[in-house]
Image (cartoon, rainbow, N blue to C red):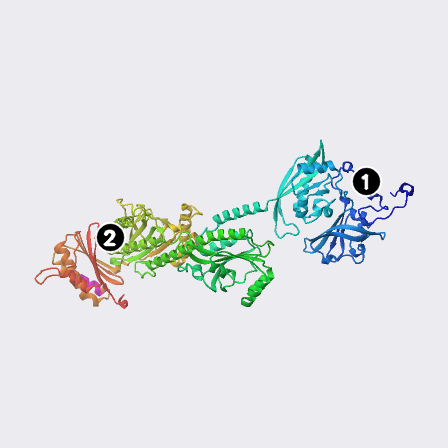
């Protein structure tokens, strides 16, 4: 409503002050009246029309216009939204495109009625959700007096509030700021007086602060909050602790005071401690050089840097020999093993993972290796130009991503140079500081020790694995008694190479020994112990000991090895560690189709019948080797031709993911493949039970049994009569003729004559002669005596002693084995391949 002229007196003089209301707009007088006494302010704390607000897009088109803007310039939203802002600017006014991100000043604007108004504006450039640029412009319609209106309230502020501080009235309009607060905002009190806090500093954190201010007004209780925010004019985020207190005059709340405290240094110190703690738990989780380097890069991004690379000397990345202990002069060659970035896919990278690159002596990487300490550099146009002469691709990346600060820290452990870690910033506006360099050096030093540990471990593991593979059979000879297939898988890098082994040992009389064992521990020592045990088993098997006796002798050997390991240690030295092992030893006879087995603390084997059913043989467990003075027991099992024996170490069935019963059930399912090729069965077993890398060494041996036909074996029971020697020769000759081995008759007659004669003369009944026609011709003579003959050289006048010497000369091999009721002397002759 417009006042009558009589009420106004003389014609008013139109002022150029935009905050002096237009006489044509009566509601402006009402607003000004409300400003004269804060105690008479409306109950609504947010008078949206008390601030003129407008939004202008990048093309200069008005996209937002509030009621306060209508009061100021007279344009309704429907008249101005969608039109160019040029219609409200005086010709020759400032160009919005040339303004910084935040601008404040006085601008001459055109009222709807044509009047010119000098208006104090605060403008913010901001980015919309779709990435476009727009301006958010605000101006208070009314202002407090240049000097604070209420001296008593001002006195309360100075008495009760800290600095920097700001005072807001009950409508949450700014009334006063301290000098420290002005410096913090980068704005004067005149720039922001009369504005709400989000209008002076639009940000989500500021909106939350205003909500706490309102809560302080409503409840009368102080409020506290903390947040991080980068203010205009500053190149980094600051951590703020904000205290909001209501200002009371008697029992009445007159406003709120906002005090802020810079907690940036304390916050950064806490972040650095957290980063050091995280580095101590995350770096070095695996004994792998590349994984450890990647953990260093992952920890540092984004807390410390925007882009991190880890480059190692080539011999270090391969776990090779020792590198130089002193500085590396001049140009260095490094291999990229890890990187991390705040940008997906690390597009800043010039060198790909696994590639090598040369760094000139002027580069930060080479400089830190020369000086043996961290280097911190600002990326300037001059430094980029130097890179352009030596590495244009790197210079182009620096310009493209606007790198501005970098640090290079040497990876050095135990006096050994390993490589360099480079930390760079391009998204974070703040350059690196000395504290950042100290932090980078601390976490890099820890990573260097872990990388060196991984390198040393890798080298030791490679040595142990090479030793292990050299001591294991690379290929096993074919045998008439069994068809076999095997697999050996070393443990993953965390557990290290163990002492698992397997073997197939040909025995006399076409028999075969199957062995699987597992030495306690990992590393070179376990591999060396495995090699000694495998050699011992082969030696004991050559004596034709039964399985239980062989394990007893092997147990004695392990005890001797343990005594050797513990003896000779200097006082106070660490123990060499326990020496122990488990073993399963089986002997299969293709003539009788019986298998004798014994085990020393080893998992029981599985037997697969020709129809595909699977059973785990119930063998006495026996103690592990090395406990001593405990017996072992053999069990005889009859195997049908085509049966499969599965011998394995515990690494196949022991898993963190499943129980032992579940593993044996899975093994049973994987083995139930009647007549399947053994190679395919091995692959199926490993695929089923070990889909990933095993945590422990795994040895698997599958053996499918064969049987000799009755026509390939001839047996005669002999009386203890020297006259039976001639008949034994004739019987043997006739059998060889039936087999088509006439060329072997002469030698066989001599062997039969000597062996039978010795048995009749020196042994006791029962005496048995047996010929076995396999891939070789085997002659056996068994008797009831346990006294074993031995080879000796007879003197000139000796009556005996030449028989076994003659047998040894005529045959490929000969030997003696003990049985339950006596002994057996055997001799083996080689046959031409065409004869079999």
Cα distance in 3D space between marks 2 and 1: 117 Å
Query: Which comes before the other along the chain, label 2 or label 1?
Result: 1
Q: Residue furthest left?
A: 797
**Nearest the eye: 490 or 385:** 385
Which residue is found at the position 47% from the left and 61% from the top? 335
Magenta stretch mostly in which secondary structure?
Answer: helix
Q: Which residues are magenta?
A: 728-737
Q: From the viewer's perspective, tell me whether residue 753 is left or right of residue 586.
A: left
Residue 730 lies in the magenta-colored region:
yes
Percent coordinates x, y for residue 286 in the rendering: 45, 52
Q: Secondary structure at mark 1?
A: helix
Tell me where residue 502 appears, x and y as whole percent.
33, 55
Q: Is there any visible trace of residue 486 in the rendered image? A: no
Quadrant in the picture for the C terminus: bottom left
Q: Farthest residue toward the top?
A: 251
Q: Dot 1: few (<14), some (14–19), or many (≥20) neighbours within 10 Å?
A: some
Left or right side of 687 for 726: left
Q: Is residue 12 magenta?
A: no
Identify the secondary structure beneath mark 2. loop
Residue on which the image places disc 2: 545
Q: Is residue 729 above or below residue 500?
A: below
Residue 7 visible at all: yes
Query: Residue tagged by mark 1?
Result: 33
Q: Position of residue 742 (x, y in %)?
A: 21, 67
Give the camera-side residue of 665 and 58. 58
10 Å crowding of disc 2: few (<14), some (14-19), many (20+): some
């Amino acid at each position: 409503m417009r006042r009558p002229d009589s009420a106004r007196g003389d014609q008013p003089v139109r002022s150029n002050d935009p905050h002096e209301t237009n006489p044509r707009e009566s509601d402006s007088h009402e607003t000004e009246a409300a400003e004269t006494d804060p105690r008479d302010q409306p109950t609504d704390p947010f008078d949206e029309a008390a601030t003129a607000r407008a939004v202008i897009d990048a093309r200069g088109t008005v996209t937002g216009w509030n009621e306060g803007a209508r009061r100021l310039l007279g344009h309704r939203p429907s008249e101005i939204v969608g039109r160019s802002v040029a219609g409200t600017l005086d010709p020759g006014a400032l160009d919005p495109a040339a303004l910084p991100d935040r601008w404040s000043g006085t601008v001459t604007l055109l009222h709807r009625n044509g009047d010119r108004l000098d208006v104090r504006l605060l403008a913010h450039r901001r980015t919309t959700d779709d990435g476009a640029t727009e301006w958010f412009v605000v101006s208070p319609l009314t202002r407090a007096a240049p000097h604070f209106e209420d001296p008593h309230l001002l006195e309360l502020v100075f008495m009760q509030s800290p600095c920097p501080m700001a005072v807001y009235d009950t409508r949450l309009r700014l009334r006063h700021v301290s000098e420290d607060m002005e410096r913090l905002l980068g704005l004067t009190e005149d720039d922001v007086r009369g504005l709400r806090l989000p209008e002076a500093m639009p940000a989500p954190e500021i909106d939350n602060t205003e909500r706490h201010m309102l809560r302080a007004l409503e409840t009368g209780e102080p409020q506290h909050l903390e947040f991080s925010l980068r203010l205009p004019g500053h190149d980094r985020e600051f951590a703020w602790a904000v205290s909001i207190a209501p200002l009371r005059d008697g029992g009445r709340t007159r406003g709120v005071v906002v005090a802020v405290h810079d907690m940036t240094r304390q916050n950064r110190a806490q972040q650095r401690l957290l980063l050091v703690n995280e580095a101590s738990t995350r770096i070095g989780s695996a004994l792998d050089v590349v994984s450890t380097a990647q953990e260093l890069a992952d920890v540092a991004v984004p807390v410390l840097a925007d882009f991190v690379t880890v480059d190692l000397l080539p011999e270090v990345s391969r776990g090779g020999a020792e590198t130089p202990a002193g500085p590396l002069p001049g140009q260095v060659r490094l291999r990229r093993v890890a990187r991390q970035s705040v940008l997906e896919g690390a597009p800043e990278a010039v060198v790909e993972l696994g590639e090598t690159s040369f760094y000139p002596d002027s580069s930060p990487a080479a400089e830190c290796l020369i000086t043996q300490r961290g280097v911190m550099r600002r990326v300037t146009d001059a430094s980029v130009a130097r890179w352009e002469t030596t590495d244009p691709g790197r210079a182009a990346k620096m310009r493209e991503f606007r790198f501005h600060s970098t640090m290079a820290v040497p990876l050095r452990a135990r006096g050994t140079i390993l490589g360099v870690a480079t930390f760079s910033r391009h998204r974070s506006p703040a350059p690196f500081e000395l504290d950042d360099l100290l932090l980078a050096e601390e976490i890099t030093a820890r990573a260097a020790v872990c990388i060196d540990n991984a390198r040393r471990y890798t080298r030791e593991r490679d040595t142990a694995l090479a030793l292990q593979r050299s001591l294991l059979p690379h290929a096993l000879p074919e045998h008439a008694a069994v068809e076999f297939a095997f697999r050996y898988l070393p443990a993953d890098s965390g557990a290290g190479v163990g002492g698992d082994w397997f073997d197939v040992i040909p025995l006399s009389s076409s028999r075969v020994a199957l062995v699987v064992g597992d030495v306690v521990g990992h590393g070179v020592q376990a591999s060396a112990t495995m090699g000694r045990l495998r050699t011992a088993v082969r030696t004991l098997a050559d004596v034709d000991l039964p399985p239980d006796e062989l394990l007893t002798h092997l147990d004695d050997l392990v005890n001797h090895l343990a005594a050797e390991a513990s003896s000779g240690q200097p006082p106070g030295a660490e123990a060499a560690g326990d020496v122990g092992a488990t073993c399963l030893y089986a002997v299969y006879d293709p003539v009788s189709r019986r298998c004798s087995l014994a085990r020393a603390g080893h998992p029981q084997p599985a037997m697969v019948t020709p129809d595909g059913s699977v059973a785990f043989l119930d063998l006495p467990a026996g103690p592990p080797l090395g406990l001593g003075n405990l017996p072992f027991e053999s069990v005889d099992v009859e195997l049908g031709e085509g049966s499969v024996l599965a011998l394995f170490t515990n690494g196949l069935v022991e898993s963190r993911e499943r129980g032992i019963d579940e593993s044996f059930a899975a093994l049973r399912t994987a083995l139930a493949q009647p007549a399947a090729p053994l190679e395919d069965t091995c692959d199926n077993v490993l695929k089923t039970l070990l889909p990933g890398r095993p945590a422990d060494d795994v040895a698997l041996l599958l053996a499918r049994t064969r049987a000799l036909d009755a026509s390939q074996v001839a047996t005669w029971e002999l009386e203890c009569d020297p006259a039976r020697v001639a008949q034994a020769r004739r019987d043997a000759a006739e059998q060889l003729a039936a087999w088509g081995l006439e060329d072997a008759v002469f030698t066989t007659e001599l062997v039969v004559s000597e062996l039978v004669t010795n048995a009749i003369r020196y042994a006791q009944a029962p005496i048995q002669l047996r010929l076995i026609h396999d891939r070789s011709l085997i002659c056996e003579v068994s008797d009831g005596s346990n006294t074993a003959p031995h080879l000796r050289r007879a003197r000139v006048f000796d009556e005996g002693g030449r028989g076994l010497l003659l047998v040894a000369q005529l045959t490929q091999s000969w030997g003696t084995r003990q049985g339950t009721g006596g002994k057996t002397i055997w001799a083996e002759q080689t046959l031409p391949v065409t004869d079999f």
